[in-house]
Amino acid sequence: MRPSTLKHLALGCAVIAAAGGIGLMRRLSVPQSCGRSVHQVMVEPGQPCFSLTQETVAGRPESYGFIVKYKQTAKPKTIATLLEQMNVRQAHRYANLPLFVFGMYPENTLEGTNAFLERLGKHPDVEYVEPNYVYKALDTRPDDPGFAEQWGHFNDGQPIKGGRPGIPGVDAAVMAAWDVTTGSGEVVVAVIDTGIDYAHEDLADNMWVNEREIPDNGLDDDGNGIVDDYYGYNAVGNNGRPMDDNGHGTHCAGVIGAKGDNGTGIAGVNWNVRLMALKFLDASGRGTLNDALECIDYAIAMKRRGVNVRVLSNSWGGGGYSRALEEAIRAANANDILFVAAAGNTGTDNDRFPHYPASYDVPNIVSVAALSPDDKLAPFSCYGKKTVHLAAPGVDVYSTVPVSIFGEGYRHFSGTSMATPYVAGAAALLLAQDQALSVKQLKGRLLRSVTPAATLAGRVETGGRLNIARALGVRSVEQVVTAE
């Protein structure tokens, strides 16, 4: 059947209209283009936000044909003869696009479709030729079954953990950010914690691996003094097996980078990223200064070897002031590595009672408080007008945990520990967009782009909550919630 441009346009509108019932976006303040893909759809306020993505159909391009544009100097009859000689099927011209011809591949294209298009494109009367690309309506809502529990990613007022609903729009604007980028495997985030379950179904594909090391051969292949450090380093056991035996580190890792849109579990802030496991906390969640220093030292060493370690996620704290730890963080800063740290869970003012490492006055530190789904500072969260920078989702956060410990792969945790990886994940998304950002620029973008919240005014330096979409340059997403 001869394709019709008007029919195609009507069909595309029908597809987008039908898709509107699948994924809802919060109301936008002005009409906006909601994607950075090949083609874009304009939406009015209150309508779902969809982008169109371009794809080729692997293995069956002959079913979709091609488009050829011939030169103005060419005669239509000459082109028609050319296509006939090349056994093109169902060739036709467009009434108002006189230089274009649509055609289906010959039934027996022995040379292959790419070679066929190349040969056709070299004809002196042809300006260019390209496949008849297939487009689909793309909602950035991933297909991970646990996504509805991730209110910090997208809060539509859904009940959290089966309880009270949150306030629509109180989130980190993660889903809107995904219209810009879903992350990059070129960016490495080191999680300094209890380790990571690197065999977890939702984390395995996004784990960083030491390419200079051969796993499980009992040798120090890369000569760094650690045997089999394939996924990172275990400072507690002084070995290369940073497997999580507590669950805390795995939960944090999932917020940063659980594999997104894979039909499994949840979606991290980054669908694609590399997670380096650095274990300095034991099964009980305790660790020493020496082991913390060793993990920071490992990350810096890998950065100097060419590994793109740009962010350290630190959901831990306690102890007194340590000059050694402060200087180690300064060394990370000198190596262009951001240090994201939990503000603490004692509900106290860090301006008066410092909570380390978040309270060190080092330029690369971002101190993170915990936000609840009703846009309030969590009761347990530390705060500080001068020393805590911003708030991020930290109450009933749903993320990955080791099945071997919990009997299931996902659970809700609360704490500034959960808010911290939201900011670390946001930094990784910014670096996926622009890897040339310095630590200073990265921190500045995160802090300048917050959404002001009345309950955070005077409690954190920026007076606002994390807004990843705005940090990425999406300016029309309105997320200001009026305090009651």
Image: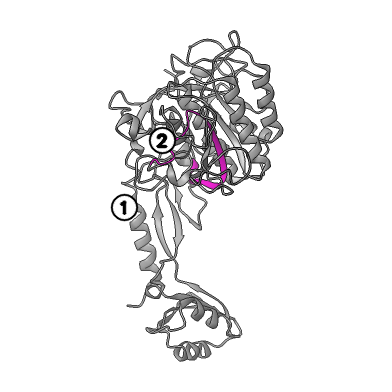
- Amino acid on which disc 1 is placed: Ala
Residue 474: quadrant of the picture = top right
First reached walking from the N terminus: tag 1 or tag 2: 1
Q: Quadrant of the N terminus?
A: bottom left
Q: As rendered, which of 377 and 258 lies closer to the eye?
A: 258
Which residues are the magenta region?
Answer: 177-200
Residue 404: quadrant of the picture = top left
Mark 1: which secondary structure?
helix
**In the figure, 58 relative to 155: above or below?**
below
**In the figure, 223 relative to 67: above or below?**
above
Q: As rendered, which of 406 and 378 lies closer to the eye?
A: 406
* Residue 154, disc: 2
* Residue 451 location (% of width, % of height): 53, 28
Observer-side mark, 1 or 2, equals 2
Q: Quadrant of the C terminus?
A: top left
Identify the residue under disc 1. Answer: 18
Q: Is residue 197 magenta?
A: yes
Q: Are marks 1 and 2 in contact (CB under 8 Å)?
A: no
**Residue at image point 35% right, 77% down:** 2
Q: As rendered, which of 478 and 417 lies closer to the eye?
A: 417
Q: What is the crowding at mark 2: few (fewer than 14 residues within 10 Å), some, or many (at least 20)?
A: many
